[in-house]
Amino acid sequence: MSGEFRLPLRVYYEDTDAAGIVYHANYLKFMERARTEWLRALGFEQDDLARRYGIAFVVRNAELDYIRAAHFNDALTATCAPTRCGRASVEFLQKVFDAQGQLICQGNIRVGSVDFRRMVPLRIPDDIFERISNAL
């Protein structure tokens, strides 16, 4: 799998503020879901990575640009595209679009590979690194 992964989403009441607008922090949740499903599409479950390899991917850096508002009950699409894979980190360009294809939010996200128990940096195992690198 290479290129941009796409995940359809729906804005629920819990995602919004009192005005029915998606609360800014929830875009990070949408992007997290897209990264989780992207990883699953590569053949890796996060709980299995912790159990079999002793690793977890944690957000190291997130930079978001909010373009326009999304509202309660909107149909959205969150995307995930890896842009760089290092030996202990992966960088992504992530976007959220509305049903008409208008860009709502865009983010550059860097996740680090850490030892699941000690939460210290850990090299990405070779087979995982290879599969992620092939997805670039």
Image: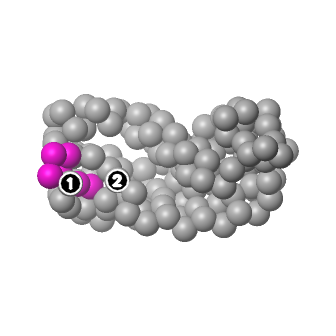
Query: Furthest residue to the front?
Result: 18
- Between 34 and 64, the one lying in front of the other is 64
Circle 2 — which element?
A: strand
Q: Residues within 10 Å of mark 2 (few under 14, many from 20)?
A: some
Q: Is residue 73 left or right of residue 91?
A: right
> Is residue 79 visible to us here?
no
Q: Is residue 113 above or below residue 128?
A: below
Q: Amino acid at mark 1?
A: Met
Circle 1 — which element?
A: loop
Q: Amino acid at mark 2?
A: Val
Quarter-of-image position of residue 104: bottom right
Q: Residue at x 72, y 42 (%)?
A: 16
Q: Residue at x 26, y 55 (%)?
A: 113
Residue 63 point in image, percent of width and height: 54, 68
Q: How is colour applied across the structure in the image? A: one colour
* Cβ atoms at labels 1 and 2 below 8 Å apart: yes
- Between 4 and 60, the one lying in front of the other is 60
Residue 128 point in image, percent of width and height: 26, 46
Q: Residue at x 50, y 46 (%)?
A: 32
- Between 132 and 19, the one lying in front of the other is 19
Residue 119 point in image, percent of width and height: 20, 54
> Label 1, label 2: how many angstroms apart (C-alpha)?
9 Å
> Where are the magenta residues, as a range?
113-118
- Quadrant the C terminus occupies: bottom left
Q: Earlier in the sequence, mark 1 or mark 2?
A: 2
Q: Is residue 16 above or below residue 13?
A: below
Report the number of numbered marks.
2
109 magenta-colored: no
Which residue corresponds to mark 1?
119
Which residue corresponds to mark 2?
58
Q: Residues within 10 Å of mark 1 (few under 14, many from 20)?
A: few
Q: Is residue 96 left or right of residue 80?
A: right
